[in-house]
Image: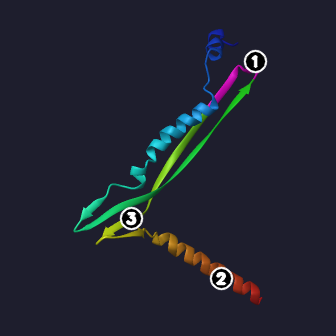
């Protein structure tokens, strides 16, 4: 048996428009991925200025559903996230500016090994 109080409470709930929900999420997540977080605060030491550089990725998702008589069971939801990852730094020294990438040696070694195995497999396939 259904409780009429719960049914009335569900019917009185105003759901946000999906566009407004995503705009709010994007604003809040965008505030995290500001330029000050992408380009860190400059650090100066011994005549060399270093400015950290990062990359940011933003993702949003969500959905909604209506079902039942007169759409009594409605729902909407969403979420998102930001990933900020250091990629290098800008070095200012003696009036010259250079970008220095941060090299992930694990990734570079893994890519080299994968390439080597692919090359060996290709050579074996062509020979036999």
Residues drawn in magenta: 68-76
Q: Which residue is mark 2?
A: 119
Secondary element under disc 1, as helix, strand or loop, is helix
Report the Cα–Cα distance between label 3 and label 2: 34 Å
* Closer to the eye: label 3 or 2: 3
Relative image position of residue 51 (x, y in whole percent): 35, 61
Q: Is residue 31 magenta?
A: no
Residue found 48% across the figure and 38% down from its top = 28
Q: Which residue is mark 1?
A: 70
Q: Residue furthest left?
A: 46
Report the Cα–Cα distance between label 1 and label 2: 62 Å
| Picture quadrant where residue 11 is located | top right
In the rendered view, tell whether residue 20 sits above or below residue 121: above
Mark found first going from the N terminus, 1 or 2: 1
Give left or right: position of 21 versus 72.
Answer: left
Q: Residues within 10 Å of mark 2 (few under 14, many from 20)?
A: few
Q: Which residue is mark 3?
A: 89
Mark found first going from the N terminus, 1 or 3: 1
Relative image position of residue 58 (x, y in whole percent): 54, 48
Give left or right: position of 39 versus 111.
Answer: left
Q: Residues within 10 Å of mark 1 (few under 14, many from 20)?
A: few
């Amino acid at each position: 048996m259904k409780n009429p109080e719960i049914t009335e409470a569900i019917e009185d709930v105003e759901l946000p428009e999906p566009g407004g929900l995503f705009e709010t999420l994007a604003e809040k997540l965008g505030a995290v991925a500001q330029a000050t977080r992408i380009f860190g605060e400059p650090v100066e030491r011994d005549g060399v200025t270093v400015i950290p550089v990062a990359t940011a990725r933003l993702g949003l998702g969500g959905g909604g559903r209506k079902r039942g008589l007169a759409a009594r069971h409605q729902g909407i939801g969403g979420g998102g996230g930001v990933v900020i990852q250091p990629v290098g730094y800008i070095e200012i020294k003696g009036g010259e500016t250079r970008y220095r990438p941060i090299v992930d040696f694990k990734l570079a070694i893994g890519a080299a090994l994968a390439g080597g195995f692919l090359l060996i497999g290709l050579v074996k396939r062509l020979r036999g």
